[in-house]
Amino acid sequence: MFSYFKSIENKFYIFSRLVSVTIKPLLLFVSLSFGYKEFGTIIAMIFLINSTNMMFFSIPIFRNFFINKNHKSTLRKKYYSTKYKFEIILIFSISIIFLIPINIFFESGLEIFFCSISIYSINKIYDEIQRLLIIKKNFYKWSIITNFKNLTLTILLLSPILGINILYFFFIYFFINFFVLYKFIKISFNFYFISRKKINKFFQYIWNNKQIYIINYFILFYNLGDKILIGKNYKEILIEYMFLSNILTIPLSCIHFFYIAKYRTEFVKNDINFKEVILGKNFNYLLISTFFITSLIILIYLNLYPSKLSIESIIFLLLIYLIKSYNLILNEVIYWKNFYRKFFFFEFVFFVLIILFFLSIVHFSLNLNIFLFLLLIFFIIKFTFKLFYFKKYNF
């Protein structure tokens, strides 16, 4: 991991990633610390709606582009590049409309709806631009747009301080970020007429590869499902739950940014296996150090402010994210294997189980302690069975 510090570009990368994973918890922490309950509830719900919509439209269309970007054939590379750009535009257009039913599901008002459009649009545009900049290893430009997008979120704090509607500050956030991203849009994307034939061809491609995309949705839902349930049925603890979840997401983000992204080529080429990772010094150093720091932050928070969550709930939540860290690596290893589609039925069964589990929690009105304990058991069982199936196919 220390090799990242050897170049200026990677220093930019590290600093920007740290800003990315800390800015949202910071806003929620300020809301909890200064008693901005209404403000905190609004931004927690907006972050949740944004994450939910990003989950639904995180179709891994970049998979074939990544695989073929270093292909010897220039025509093949150009084909996948052009195809990728077209699909980005189409998915973005559909995803904006999809914000309507998501806001209805969470019973949010027009204020949150328009705020969610603003932040989602910027995040989706940024997501595609930053992916291309990272592929090109242009970490300096990547760090500029990343830091600007994240740091400008702090202007939202002016809403409770000045007593002005938060919607105005989200509009300001949208326009200043769009102005910065616009030049990258012109450079990175070639917008052209979207014909019905191309749209039909795209949906046919999605249908032909439905197993890969559905598996991706299942995996994303496992990571977000508990927050959706909290946002729907336990809104009184939404701010604190989102804060603690964002803090505990830091180790997963660090593993993704500083380990998986670093060895992306090895994962794609299947030159790395699960056992090597979990027994490796770099992974364990990163895992232990990040969980130690996040646990320390949580302890400091609990000593300073009274929590609506019990100690048991927080311990269960921490263990859930520890399991998710190992599962993150296992998913990445499996994702690039030829037998990836064979996990469709496995993921489908556990998806049905977790939906039934969530419905049972709502129906029986179980408290948070029981919910998180049962969720921990669920993730342990799922990880164990998935590891077993992986060993079965990876012979």
Image: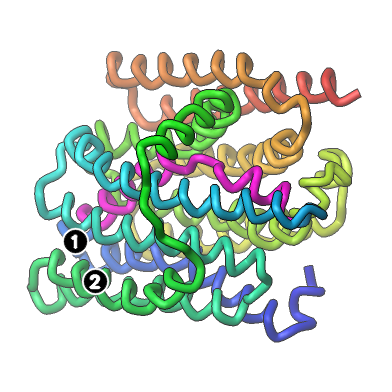
Quick one: label 1 or label 2, which is nearer the N terminus?
1
* Rendered view: 345 above or below 122: above
Residue beneath the point at 59% across and 69% down: 133
Q: Position of residue 169 (x, y in %)?
A: 18, 72
Residue at mark 1 to residue at mark 2: CA–CA distance: 9 Å
Magenta range is: 41-69
Q: Secondary structure at mark 2?
A: helix
Residue beneath the point at 24% across and 54% down: 117
Q: Is residue 135 magenta?
A: no
Q: Could you tell me which quadrant the C terminus lies in?
A: top right
Q: Which residue is mark 2?
A: 156
| Residue type indicated by callout 1 | Phe
Q: Is residue 158 left or right of residue 92?
A: left
| Residue type indicated by callout 2 | Leu
Q: Which of labels 1 and 2 is toward the front? A: 2
Q: Which residue is mark 1?
A: 39
